[in-house]
Amino acid sequence: MKKIEAIVRPDVFPTIRQALALHGIDGFSVSEVAGIGKQEGRTGLFRGNKYEMEFHTKLKIEMVVDDSEVAALTDLILETASTGKVGDGKIFIIPVEEAIRIRTKETGAIAVH
């Protein structure tokens, strides 16, 4: 099993969500995160006062999938999340040693699905 973490722009999430659903993925977590990278900060204006916004709001999508699904899901995210601009995000693929469903104590891939 692998854990896919994708950090993406919030505005592309509805497209990603629909594509995941069409692919049969209905179990994942989404968190609002903020970060900084090559995408530079921007200046905001609030009641006539300028301020620097260093961090950009992103969404982090996390899912644990079978090894056989990783390539297809990575391609799906790449196709739906890419705008071609700096700040599109990142995808991380992390090995998962074990998964345990707390309610039933099932382990392995059955605990994820």
Image (spheres, rainbow, N blue to C red):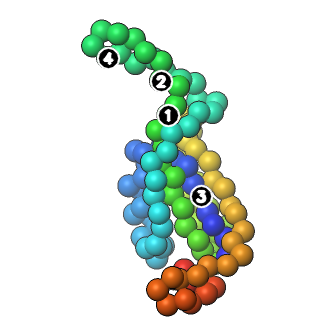
SS type, badge 4: strand
Which residue shows up at 55% across the image and 89% down it?
105
Does the CB distance between marks 2 and 3 fall below 8 Å?
A: no
Give the CA distance from mark 1 to mark 4.
17 Å
What residue is shown at x 58% (from left), y 29% (from top)? 39
Coordinates of residue 6 in the picture (x, y in percent): 57, 54
Which three-letter amino acid code belongs to the residue tagged 3? Glu
Q: Which amino acid is tagged 1?
A: His
Q: CA distance from mark 1 to mark 3?
A: 17 Å
Q: Residues within 10 Å of mark 1 (few under 14, many from 20)?
A: some
Distance from disc 4 to disc 3, alpha carbons, whole Å, reads 33 Å
Q: Amino acid at mark 2?
A: Met
**Closer-to-camera residue (88/79):** 88
Say what amino acid the circle numbered 4 marks: Phe
Residue 104 in the image: state x and y as whole percent.
Answer: 49, 90
Q: Where is residue 44 shown, x and y percent of the image?
A: 40, 18
Q: Earlier in the sequence, mark 1 or mark 4?
A: 4
Quarter of the image that includes the N terminus: bottom right
Q: Earlier in the sequence, mark 1 or mark 3?
A: 3
Disc 2 to disc 1: CB gap under 8 Å: yes
Residue beneath label 1, please?
Answer: 56
Residue at label 2?
53
Q: Is residue 89 above or below residue 40?
A: below
At horizontal 72% and vertical 68% (from top left) the residue drawn is 95
Mark toward the viewer: 4 or 3: 4
Asked if residue 67 can be seen in this view, the reply is: no
C-alpha span from label 2 to label 3: 25 Å
12 vs 89, left or right, is left
Q: Position of residue 16 (x, y in %)?
A: 45, 58
